[in-house]
Image (tube, rainbow, N blue to C red):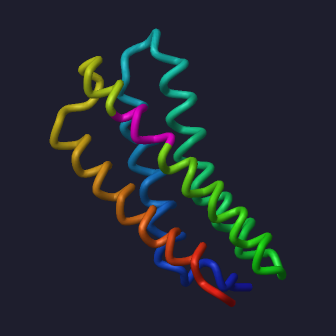
Amino acid sequence: MAFMLEKLDVYNKAIDFYCQVSKLTKSFPKGNYHIIDQFNRAALSVSLNIAEGNGRYHLKERQSFFRIARGSAFECVPILEICKRENLVDAAVCQTLLQNLETICKMLSGLINKKQ
């Protein structure tokens, strides 16, 4: 059974983003559990909330979950900055991930502002 949400570009971009974060954090040195855990949770939360919102019947409920997804995407921004400052992520990787987040956030804003 295929789910409609699997056809959403923002959902697929969010899944891709999580996979990039997961792969990246596996290379972090030991002793960074707190940042690894928080980064993975925030990145995962984006796609999970898109999925949950897509499963809701009422517009306000959908919009609420899309707002939460957007908030989780925004949560990843300072985590990336901290990782860059702590030399866990190089600047080019950080920039690519930030661009991906910006795209996801714009797409989520479109879903939030959608009237149906």
x, y percentage for residue 57? Answer: 83, 82
x, y percentage for residue 44? Answer: 58, 49
In the figure, is residue 71 to the left or right of 20?
A: right
Q: Is residue 35 magenta?
A: no
Judge whether 10 appears above or below 26 on screen: below
Residue toward you, 93 or 99: 99
User: Which image quarter is the N terminus in?
Assistant: bottom right
User: Which image quarter is the C terminus in?
Assistant: bottom right
The furthest residue to the right? 57
Q: Residue at x 16, y 42 (%)?
A: 92
Q: Residue at x 56, y 47 (%)?
A: 72
- Our reading of the magenta stretch's main secondary structure is helix
Q: Residue at x 60, y 39 (%)?
A: 41
Q: Which residues are magenta?
A: 75-80
Q: Quadrant of residue 25?
A: top left
x, y percentage for residue 105? Answer: 45, 62
